Amino acid sequence: MELFYALPGQIDRKAGVVMLDGDEFHHLVRVLRKKRNECIVVTDGKGTHFDVCVTAIEKSVLKGAITAERTVARSATTVTVALSLLKAPPRFELFLEKATELGISAVIPMITARTVAQPPGDRITKRLVRWKTIMLSASRQSGRYYLPDIIEPLPFGKVIGLSGYDRKLIPYERSPHTVSDVRCTGGNVLFLIGGEGGFTAEEVLCARDAGFTEISFGRSVLRAETAGIFAVSMVRARLLEQAAGEWL
């Protein structure tokens, strides 16, 4: 099933109308060659499934009538990864794409003591637009009803002070705790992933004081983006093992 995304302003529930433009219009009309009276599935990225019948195709807008809607339940486990900005932007973008496909709920770009890449504010704005586009494309490909969030970069100190997380984990190569020792499902889960060179010993201590549990991903040293992808994959695998029909 192909899923298409509409912004809040493109959905009029009272009138029962959806209007799609931009990339969604291009994909629907230019690539898939959708015609009037065909049916499509649209979501607002916040868990709503809309059955839509195409009523009109104009120069740059596809209009459709909502024939049915329902809410898709969200997983009881949400995963946020705070990943250090990386020296090579394509590696950070690879993480965004794959983590989105695997079901990540939110990404926090992070600045640590060893973060090499710290772009100025004007570049960050442009990168946020690009990052959101990458995550939207990955969400479309994987058929996600909930779009993951991504915010402006935060310093390490602010990240470890964030509230609202039930489980807070920091992968660290010297940790005695293996993945089988630590519960990583249920509620809101936050992983901290360091960049090139990993975390400093002081940062690990600060995270521990802030309530984070150290966890080892094995003997081999993973690249930052690989560690982030592994963290989301690990949670997804645990959920599938539970045989509860729940995954990210």
Image (cartoon, helix red, strand yellow):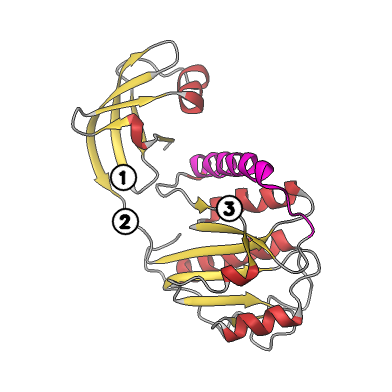
**Which residue, given by chain and number where applicable, does mark 3 sit on?**
152
Mark 1 vs mark 3, CA separation in Å:
26 Å
Q: Amino acid at mark 2?
A: Ala
Q: Check residue 133 for magenta coloring.
A: yes
**Residue neighbourhood size for the residue with mark 3, other residues' Cα within 10 Å, grouped as few (<14), some (14–19), many (≥20):** few
Mark 3 vs mark 2, CA separation in Å:
28 Å
Characterize the magenta stretch by its predominant secondary structure: helix
Residue 136, horizontal then vertical, whole percent: 52, 41
Residue 181, horizontal then vertical, whole percent: 57, 86
- In the displayed structure, 29 sits above or below 2; it is above
In the displayed structure, does residue 98 sit left or right of residue 7? right
Which quadrant would the C terminus be assigned to in this image?
bottom left
**Which residue, given by chain and number where applicable, does mark 2 sit on?**
73
Q: Does residue 104 appear anywhere in the picture?
A: no
Residue 146, horizontal then vertical, whole percent: 41, 50
**Residue neighbourhood size for the residue with mark 2, other residues' Cα within 10 Å, grouped as few (<14), some (14–19), many (≥20):** few
- In the displayed structure, 183 sits above or below 222; it is below
- In the displayed structure, 143 sits above or below 82; it is above
Q: Which residues are magenta?
A: 116-141
Could you say which is closer to the camera, residue 11 or residue 146?
A: 11
Q: Amino acid at mark 1?
A: Thr
